[in-house]
């Protein structure tokens, strides 16, 4: 029970800390989407049932320990030797069976409601591809490719526009988990998984990879921007534009396009079309680098190119070993990719 | 019946040169010595795997800590998990089974003494191979390192592309070799139980400990086999160009998951059923009553054995199985709670109306009952597949299975140590240190593992070497770490007690607890041949019959 008290304490702290821009607390106790709310309801039901069982059985245990403790006065005498009772055995078999039946029916209902939910025509499709150690998001109908920060539209309950995620992996197993938006589903190579989310409440929802995927599993962070429909439309329009070409960044662009950068990274409309690393066409539209490991600032970006291990040791981005001038130029070029 | 052993001068009391003693221990085929070897070996690994846990906990004490690198952290949790399951809990339970099963059924040794020794040395070799990876993991040309694929080594992390070098091979071969050892021991226990029982001890009169170890052995045969097969397939992938789990060449990652958990979940019961076995012997003795509902206890155990073979994919609720498969594994998982609940009720029924003596073994047994109850209930919560979509792979799961393994199994093992140490050595463990051991472990355990559920609910995944300071995470992790250190102190008190009591403990005599099963009729420690004359039994509690000739059990059975 003390655990419960702690929980409530921390959820309160969490919600108090989220004044202003609604940023997620990553707590499954603050569900914001239909699947998460359904799961939350089931959780509370099963928690209630198990808490009741706990109180009864633990009460019996404590009672037995106190009531039947050996006393000095009984020394040398044995209590009545009882071998069992069919009626009692029957009672404590049938009752658990009934409890299991109830729990199973409640569970099966929720499994069906979430997994077999029909996909409305207005649903948004996003393909999520897990990589060591970052996320690739592709919007096949919108022609958008981005990384680590998923944008989805808020869903009006009257006209739901849920997002259906197709989950794939490029290398090892990963798991997509944003607790406030729903349960997790694994991204497994050679397998296509699916999950869906919807929420009427715009905001930033945090999560991270939940399936151990290698050295930097810990810093494979994930954020979902739930945008108001107008904001989402603006974001889509921005992402669909070609990469910005600014003449003053041409030195950096040349460095970028003549080094190994382009083996892994793509910038639409340029020779850079690598697919091992995140698409950089609109890098500056993202607020974090390295799958959420650092804020997207000039200093961090420069450090990330110079020595990725300083931010994320074990990541697959190599240190580019550029001279100071090239490093500044390339960082300046990337800073223009809005 | 004649449970008396002839008092022959114990050959161990004479002084021998240490080389001779060592030779005797290395070449022994005596089930009691092999039992002690298993236990001693497991205790060494307990200290190592415990140290690895402390390294993990120091690293997670606060956000963005840099006590160890991510690479080292990943090796630590891989080694901690692998060691604790395969080289601590399994050997310690096999050790007790080896020691106690023949004594409790009135036999002079296991059915196949040499197979017994062979099995132990295979297990020992497995553990050494695993730890040799620290030196040889990268092959001869580089410094070594331990495997870092996690204790279940999900494909394709174990493939050559993601695990170059040999560290994963050491992991594979260690489990392969010790797996053969486990199968050997399981065959041995089954053969012993079926063919070595003393006159009068039909199956319905076997002590529950023997029954439960019989069921456990059957499960080992069924559970270890797929693990061994999977390891062989992984080796074929890594060295012979196979593509079973090599996803880059069309292999299947989920195939590995199925193989691993078809082993992995029965394995949980392989570990917990012997813990139930200890409870079923210890609770009656300290409640001064026979076990409540003996036939039901046997039936419930067999039921657990069968049902637990069909629950494995509840470890895989997040891999995108369809709704029918998820529903199937949800109901089988919940169903296994029924026979488990029946067992808890029967232990409570045994205590009900008894005269409970709070000796250290009973303290641990009571701790087991309360904690195993909670572990079972959090298991039921996760059996609801949709709830598990949130909780799986989070710290909630880590807290849950440590509740099973530490709060349940380890507490039961401690109860067994305090209960049977006098039989093994002829000396009592110190009750005073025992109470310190219990209360410190109790405090540390609850600080660590009660609190650990919460970060999981607040979204903290397992197996991360560092984390962002999200609301609540840091405070909770700090409390968990402090609790872990308190547990470490409790373990040190226990080891100190084991060592000191061996020399200074009070003399135990044959039957210090006024117990009822056959091992207490032999001297402490029993002679190499256990019984001078093979005993004959007429009930489940032969020593009760002997002590209460006016009201023997045999009258009621």
Image (tube, coloured by chain):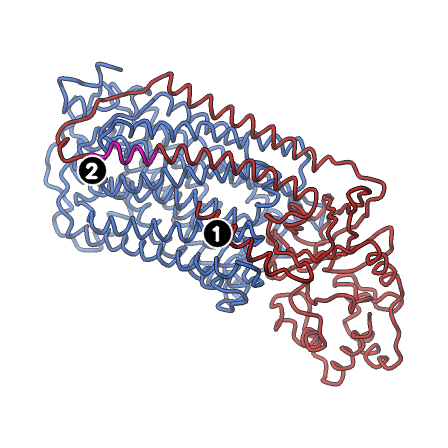
Colour used to depict chain B in the structure image: blue
**Label 2 crowd (10 A; few <14 / some 14-19 / many >=20):** some
- The residue that mark 1 highlights is A6
State the residue in front, A263 or A88: A88
Q: Kindly identify the residue that appears in the image at 39 percent across and 49 percent down.
A: B446
Image spot of residue B341 (x, y percent)? 43, 30
Chain holding disc 2 = B
Chain holding disc 1 = A
- The residue that mark 2 highlights is B528
Quarter location, residue B548: top left
Q: Is residue A318 above or below residue A237?
A: below
Q: Kindly identify the residue that appears in the image at 55 percent across and 25 percent down.
A: A101
B210 relative position to B310: left or right = left
Q: Kindly identify the residue that appears in the image at 26 percent across and 21 percent down.
A: A82
Which dot, 1 or 2, sits closer to the camera? 1
Q: Which chain did the image draw in red?
A: A
State the residue in front, A283 or A113: A113
Q: Residue furthest bottom?
A: A325
Q: Is residue B205 visible?
A: yes
């Amino acid at each position: 029970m003390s655990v419960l008290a702690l929980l409530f304490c921390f959820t309160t702290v969490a919600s108090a800390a989220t004044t202003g821009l609604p940023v997620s607390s990553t707590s499954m106790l603050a569900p914001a989407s239909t699947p998460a709310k359904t799961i939350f309801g089931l959780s509370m039901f099963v928690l209630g049932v198990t808490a009741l069982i706990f109180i009864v059985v633990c009460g019996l245990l404590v009672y037995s320990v106190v009531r039947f403790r050996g006393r000095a006065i009984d020394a040398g005498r044995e209590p009545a030797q009882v071998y069992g009772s069919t009626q009692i055995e029957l009672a404590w078999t049938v009752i658990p069976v009934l409890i299991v039946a109830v729990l199973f029916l409640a569970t099966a209902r929720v499994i069906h409601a979430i997994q077999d939910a029909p996909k409305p025509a207005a649903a948004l499709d996003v393909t999520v591809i897990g990589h060591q150690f970052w996320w690739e998001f592709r919007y096949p109908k919108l022609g958008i490719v981005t990384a680590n920060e998923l944008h989805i539209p808020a869903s009006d309950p009257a006209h739901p526009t849920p997002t259906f995620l197709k989950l794939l992996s490029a290398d090892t197993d990963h798991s997509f988990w944003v607790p406030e938006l729903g349960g997790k589903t694994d991204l497994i190579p050679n397998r296509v998984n699916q999950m869906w989310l919807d929420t009427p409440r715009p905001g930033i929802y945090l999560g991270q990879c939940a399936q151990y995927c290698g050295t930097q599993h810990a810093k494979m962070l994930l954020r979902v921007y739930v945008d108001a429909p107008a904001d989402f439309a603006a974001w889509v329009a921005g992402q669909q534009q070609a990469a910005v070409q600014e003449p003053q960044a041409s030195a950096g662009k040349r460095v970028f396009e003549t080094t190994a950068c382009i083996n892994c990274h793509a910038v639409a409309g340029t020779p850079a079309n690598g697919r091992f690393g995140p698409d950089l066409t609109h890098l500056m539209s993202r607020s974090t680098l390295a799958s959420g490991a650092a804020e997207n600032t000039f200093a961090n970006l420069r450090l990330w190119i110079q020595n990725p291990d300083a931010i994320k040791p074990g990541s697959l981005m190599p240190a580019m070993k550029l001279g100071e001038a090239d490093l500044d130029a390339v960082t300046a070029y990337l800073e223009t990719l809005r | 019946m004649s449970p008396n052993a002839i008092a022959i001068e114990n050959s161990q009391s004479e002084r021998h040169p240490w080389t001779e003693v060592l030779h005797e221990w290395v070449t022994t085929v005596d089930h009691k010595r092999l039992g002690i070897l298993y236990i001693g070996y497991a205790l060494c690994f307990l200290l190592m795997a415990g140290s690895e846990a402390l390294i993990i906990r120091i690293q997670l004490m606060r956000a963005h800590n840099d006590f160890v690198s991510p690479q080292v952290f990943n090796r630590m949790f891989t080694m901690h998990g692998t060691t604790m399951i395969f080289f601590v809990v399994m050997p310690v339970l096999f050790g007790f089974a080896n020691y106690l099963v023949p004594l409790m059924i009135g036999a002079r040794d296991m059915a196949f003494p040499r197979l017994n020794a062979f099995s132990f040395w295979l297990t020992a070799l497995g553990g050494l191979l695993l730890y040799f990876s620290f030196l040889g993991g990268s092959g001869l040309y580089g410094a070594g390192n331990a495997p870092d694929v996690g204790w279940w080594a999900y494909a394709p992390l174990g493939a050559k592309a993601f695990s170059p070098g040999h560290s994963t091979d050491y992991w594979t071969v260690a489990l392969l070799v010790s797996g053969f050892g486990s199968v050997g021991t399981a065959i041995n226990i089954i053969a012993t139980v079926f063919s070595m029982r003393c006159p009068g001890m039909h199956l319905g009169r076997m002590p529950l400990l023997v029954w439960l170890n019989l069921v456990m052995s059957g499960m080992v045969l069924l559970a270890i086999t797929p693990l061994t097969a999977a390891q062989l397939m992984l080796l074929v992938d890594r060295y012979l160009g196979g593509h079973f789990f090599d996803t880059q060449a069309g292999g299947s990652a989920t195939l590995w998951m199925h193989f691993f958990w078809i082993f992995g979940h029965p394995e949980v019961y392989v570990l917990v059923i012997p813990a139930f076995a200890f409870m079923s012997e210890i609770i009656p003795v300290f409640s001064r009553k026979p076990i409540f509902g003996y036939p039901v206890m046997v039936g419930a155990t067999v039921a657990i054995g069968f049902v637990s073979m069909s629950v494995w994919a509840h470890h895989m609720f997040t891999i995108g199985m369809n709704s029918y498969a998820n529903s199937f594994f949800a109901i089988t998982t919940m169903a296994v709670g029924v026979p488990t609940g029946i067992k808890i009720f029967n232990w409570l029924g045994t205590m009900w109306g008894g005269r409970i003596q709070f000796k250290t073994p009973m303290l641990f047994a009571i701790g087991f009952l309360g904690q195993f109850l909670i572990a079972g209930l959090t298991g039921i919560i996760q059996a609801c597949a949709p709830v598990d979509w949130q909780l799986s792979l989070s710290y909630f799961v880590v807290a849950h299975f440590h509740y099973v393994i530490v709060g349940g199994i380890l507490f039961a093992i401690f109860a067994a140590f305090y209960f049977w140490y006098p039989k093994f050595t002829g000396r009592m463990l110190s009750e005073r240190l025992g109470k310190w051991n219990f209360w410190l472990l109790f405090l540390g355990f609850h600080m660590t593992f009660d609190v650990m559920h919460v970060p999981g609910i607040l979204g903290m995944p397992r197996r991360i070497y560092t984390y962002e300071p999200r609301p609540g995470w840091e405070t909770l992790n700090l409390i968990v770490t402090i609790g872990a250190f308190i547990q470490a102190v409790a373990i040190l008190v226990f080891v100190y007690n084991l060592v000191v009591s061996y020399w200074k403990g009070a003399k135990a005599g044959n039957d210090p607890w006024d117990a009822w099963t056959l091992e207490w009729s032999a001297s402490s420690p029993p002679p190499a041949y256990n019984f001078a004359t093979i005993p004959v039994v007429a009930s489940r509690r032969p020593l009760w019959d002997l002590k209460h000739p006016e009201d023997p059990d045999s009258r009621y059975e």
